[in-house]
Image (cartoon, helix red, strand yellow):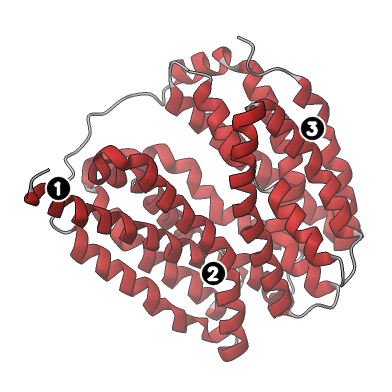
Amino acid sequence: MTPQEKLLAKKNKGKVYLISIAHFVHDSYTSFLSPILPLLIKNLSLSYTSASFLGVMLRIPSLLNPLIGTLADNMGVKYFIALSPIITAITMCLIGNALNYWSILILLFIAGISSSFFHVPAPVVLNRISKKSLGLSMSYFQIGGELSRSIGPLIIVTAISLWGLSGIYRLIPFGALISLILILKLKDESFPPAKSKKLYIRKTIIETIVEGKVLFVFIIGLMLVKSFTASVLVTFLPTYLTEKGYSLLIAGGALSLLQAAAVIGVFLAGTLSDKIGRRPSLVLLTIGAPLTMILFVFSNRWTIIPALILLGVIALSSTPLMLALIQERNFKYPSVANGLYMTISFVMSSIIVLIFGKISDMVGLEKAFYLAIIGSFIGLPILFLNPEKK
């Protein structure tokens, strides 16, 4: 390797670190919603149904990912990545000053679009600057996202304790700073438009569904269990704990602990799946999710921490294995298969979180958690389908 090539490799490695840090900063802002949900419910007198729809609104723009990917490929991906952190920071931090429920919905929808504009093109940029070390670069990128969901709740509850909910706008400069650095560091990068590939059309989607129909039914079973456990927990954990008498700081810390345990769970699950296979590992994790949920809802102040750690390790660690299972299926259109999985995941988690919110309005949040455990067992029989059989 020539001195010039070594210098280029060093600069590109620095850009990988920068994008990974940007991922951490960006996703820290989107992780603010769940910890502040108890305050929004109290201040705006929201029902649990209305509160659950806030989380759905933040994720709705993910349905536009194929369109956003097309725009990014043809308009300049580096600017999409560079501007997203400041837009997400502004919209998420202005929630504390929102006048009513509808203005919060608008802010969350804009934040969701900004989030998609960051996450869709980021792997493209990493691919073009990483050369032979793409796998390592993606690992750094993913670590940034996972850490944000652990540290972000602590940041926002600390900010609220210092400045109040209306003062969290003071966190906006961090997003602005990372956007400015991204603009300066990526301004000389050239990313030519990609050739259009018409994969997201009716024919390819139908072919992919027919080709992997057993696998997708298996995924539906997995998502039934995961939505009733992981999705409900991530959305309502701080609200549930504050209603049980814990402070907002402790409730936010509990969410951080849950997400930190999920990082450990991802590593352990990957190791387990390499030894016994993806499907057996997924079955074990999915069966364990409602069982650890039972431990959590019946825990007390002394056992809640180990219960949360077990929940994070088991209930929130299955996503990488599902993605690997899809890619190892060798679909004719792998990107379409991945898109179908993301659609199933979004639709099912959103519907179940909304149902959970409605049930909470009817019977109370604590009883709704009991019913969520019962609901999670519905998907377990589907797990005995063999998705690897062609």
Q: How far apart are marks 3 and 1 (CA)?
A: 47 Å
Question: Can residue 71 be seen?
Answer: no
Name which of mark 3 and mark 2 comes first in the sequence. 2
* Mark 1 residue crowding within 10 angstroms, few (<14) / some (14–19) / many (20+): few
Which of the numbered marks, if any, corresponds to residue 190?
A: 1
Q: Pick whichever, 177 or 90, lies toward us.
A: 177
Residue assigned mark 3: 379
Residue depicted at x 67% and y 69%: 37
Left or right position of 328 against 256: left
In the rendered image, the vertical position of residue 127 relative to residue 245, given as above or below: above
Residue depicted at x 60% and y 70%: 153
> Percent from the top left, x then y, of residue 353?
72, 50
Name which of mark 2 and mark 1 comes first in the sequence. 2
Which secondary structure, mark 3? helix
Left or right position of 62 against 190: right
Residue assigned mark 2: 103
Which secondary structure, mark 2? helix
| View extreme (bottom): residue | 162
> Percent from the top left, x then y, of residue 388?
63, 16
Q: Distance between the residues labelled 2 and 1?
A: 38 Å
Residue depicted at x 66% and y 17%: 214
Q: Residue 281 falls in which quadrant of the image?
A: top right
Which secondary structure, mark 1? loop
In the rendered image, the vertical position of residue 122 relative to residue 149, given as above or below: above
Say what amino acid the circle numbered 2 marks: Ser
Q: Distance between the residues labelled 3 and 2?
A: 36 Å
- Quadrant where the C terminus sits is top right
Residue depicted at x 76% and y 35%: 284
Q: Residue 233 falls in which quadrant of the image?
A: bottom right
